[in-house]
Amino acid sequence: MIGKELTNTPSPAGNWASRDALEMEYGYAKVEYKVREEFCNPGRILHGGVSSLMLDDVIGMANFTMGSEYLMSSINLNVDFLASAKFGEKVQVEAKLIRSGANLNHWEAVIKKDAGKIVAKASSNMIKTHVKLSDLGF
């Protein structure tokens, strides 16, 4: 899927946001989004809620690289908004595993633009549910 637009994934919200896969490996994902008009607040800059969606979605995508047989769900998402991204700009979102446990994975993610300028950063914990991915068709 590297270099391709991801629009048919298990995440309907992520599919709406539409993103291009740049890198995927165990415990890591990097994707690119183009800031569309519907991603923006009235100032035509990336809305904080959409930034949070991007961060959470890429963390979830990276979590899939871990190969768990169970669905994992975010139990928190702490976001710092540090700069703006304007309508039409491209941003890259990276998520990396910080700690993997039996039932809980801790992640950090960042949105960057231009020459590495940080737009937002986040940390999140994902907990293992009792739902098997195979029962969801994955």
Image: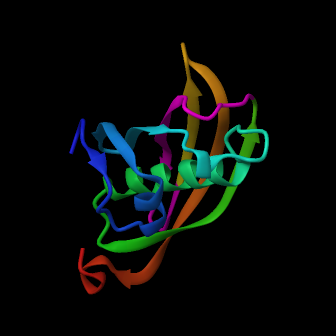
- Picture residue at 21% right of the left edge, 45% below the top: 1
Which residue is situated farthest in the right direction here? 43
Q: How many marks?
A: 0
Determine which quarter of the picture holds residue 11. bottom left
Tell me residue 64's x, y (percent).
34, 58
Closer to the camera, 5 or 9?
5
112 over 64 or under it: above or below: above
Determine which quarter of the picture holds residue 84. top right
Left or right position of 73 against 8: right
Closer to the camera, 106 or 89?
89
Left or right position of 84 against 102: right
- Picture residue at 54% right of the left edge, 49% below the top: 54
Closer to the camera, 13 or 24?
13
58 over 71 or under it: above or below: above
Tell me residue 89's x, y (percent).
55, 29
Using the rendered image of the protein, determine whether residue 127 is visible from the camera's viewpoint: yes
Q: Magenta span covers which residues?
A: 83-105
The answer to if 85 sits in the magenta stretch is yes
Closer to the camera, 135 or 86?
86
Tell me residue 125's x, y (percent).
59, 58
Q: How is the image coloured?
A: rainbow
Which residue is situated farthest in the top direction here? 115
Using the rendered image of the protein, determine whether residue 100 is visible from the camera's viewpoint: no
The answer to if 15 sits in the magenta stretch is no
- Image quadrant holding the C terminus, namely bottom left
- Picture residue at 54% right of the left edge, 44% below the top: 36
